[in-house]
Amino acid sequence: MDEPLKAFLVTLQPPGETESRASGHLDELKGLVRTLGMETLEGIVVRHREKHPRLLVGSGKATEIADRAKELGADLVIFDDELSPSQQRNWESDTGLTVIDRQEVILEIFCDRALTREAVLQVALARMQYSLPRLARSYTDLSRQRGGARGNRGGGEMQLEVDRRVILDKIDKLKDELVLVRQHRDRTRQRRDRGSLPTASIVGYTNAGKSTLLNRLADANILQEDKLFATLDPTTRRTPLGGGVDILLTDTVGFIQKLPHHLVDAFHSTLEEAVQADFLVHVVDASHPDWEVQRQTTLSVLGSLGASDKPQLLVFNKIDALGDEVTRRGLELQFPEAVFVSLRQGTGVEELKRRMVAAVKAVHSPRKIRLPLDRGDLVGYLYKNAQVLTERYTEDSIEIEALIPPAALAAVAAFDAEPSA
């Protein structure tokens, strides 16, 4: 087995940012590095007044970082902040070290973990868009060697233009393929939306416990690890909640701070699952010291997707890892409408199901339908297009209580007895 790459991590602390917040960014970068299978040798927080255009940090601090990384035997230096292509070239030219940033780490994780055709295409597109302005890294030395009079191009420069055209062509092809894949997914979604089941999407910060929730409620077998971005592709399962109520529950990709904009664009359509759902189950890791920052990050991403007004059920997970009962009580007072669970232990799961049933009924109101005895066709229609909760025969009618989606209501509206409580 190959030895894991050894990384030296750097996080910048700008003016106005607290030391704990900067340390939180560093810890998150360590988690990303661990997810990628690398070993963190050391991580430092660098205070700075402004970002330096050449190396992001001042030359003295850059020398200090490079010397320490070499002293520890690091294979590469990873910045939590985005490096421009020129800054990345300057670092590698000046120090002889491989230097990457958080964006590249996340891209590699997504590349390793994308499974569906759409996710693979989306990651490939994001990588191409990220790599395009960095092509010069490969040819700087070759261009310097060839030189030439004004108007003549070195071999590196000519090869760079060829490779740029190749990548641009690949980007166009990937975009065309994605259009076809998305059209197919949209048709699948439309068929699903015409069905009888309400829909809910699980959203939240990466590693908050979203896949664990789907596994717990739907008896699914989705990958769940104590790693950031353990799963990428949205997974939908039919989920029984009790009382005859079933829903289609979707686990979506986790959110994160400083998500590379190429990936935000690439995964926008995947995250649209959250927009299309009847309501959202927003999972928060209550044990994380920066849970409020993570909650706000999720709300911000949902806002960018146009899902801010979607009904939400807030779920605080990992309450078993809270330090004391006082902390939990403080959260309960601050968020009286939230549900508090430990998905790992099963604590609070039944209450969560009850609250999800209430959320379903707030969207798909239960209705009592009184049908004539000779309208067995409508009984069959309701079983196909709605969720039948109860069915009772009387001397002159068939009384059915059902969760009826708006699209199916018109067919039986004339026999509507009254909305159920």
Image (cartoon, helix red, strand yellow):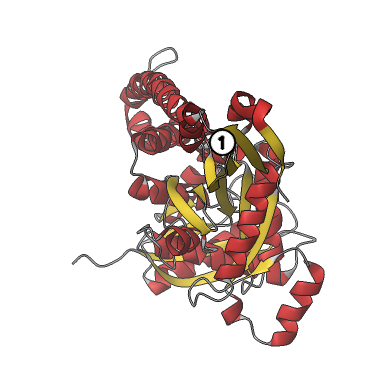
Q: Secondary structure at mark 1?
A: helix
Q: Position of residue 19 (x, y in %)?
A: 71, 71
Q: In the figure, 39 relative to 416: above or below?
A: below
Q: Position of residue 291 (x, y in %)?
A: 67, 66
Q: Position of residue 273 (x, y in %)?
A: 54, 39
Within 10 Å of the Cα at label 1, are there few (<14), some (14-19), or many (20+) other Cα atoms? Answer: some
Determine if residue 255 is in view: no
Residue plotted at (40% across, 16% down): 149
Residue plotted at (70% across, 47% down): 420
- Which one is nearer the viewer's eye here, 143 or 415? 415
Residue behind mark 1 = 272
Q: In the figure, 24 relative to 57: above or below?
A: below
Q: Residue furthest top?
A: 151
Q: In the figure, 280 relative to 417: above or below?
A: below
- Which one is nearer the viewer's eye here, 13 or 229? 229
Q: Amino acid at mark 1?
A: Glu
Residue plotted at (73% across, 52% down): 50
- Which one is nearer the viewer's eye here, 185 or 161? 185
Q: Position of residue 281 (x, y in %)?
A: 61, 54
Answer with left or right where residue 5 lies relative to residue 408. left
Q: Quadrant of residue 13?
A: bottom right
Residue plotted at (47% across, 53% down): 239
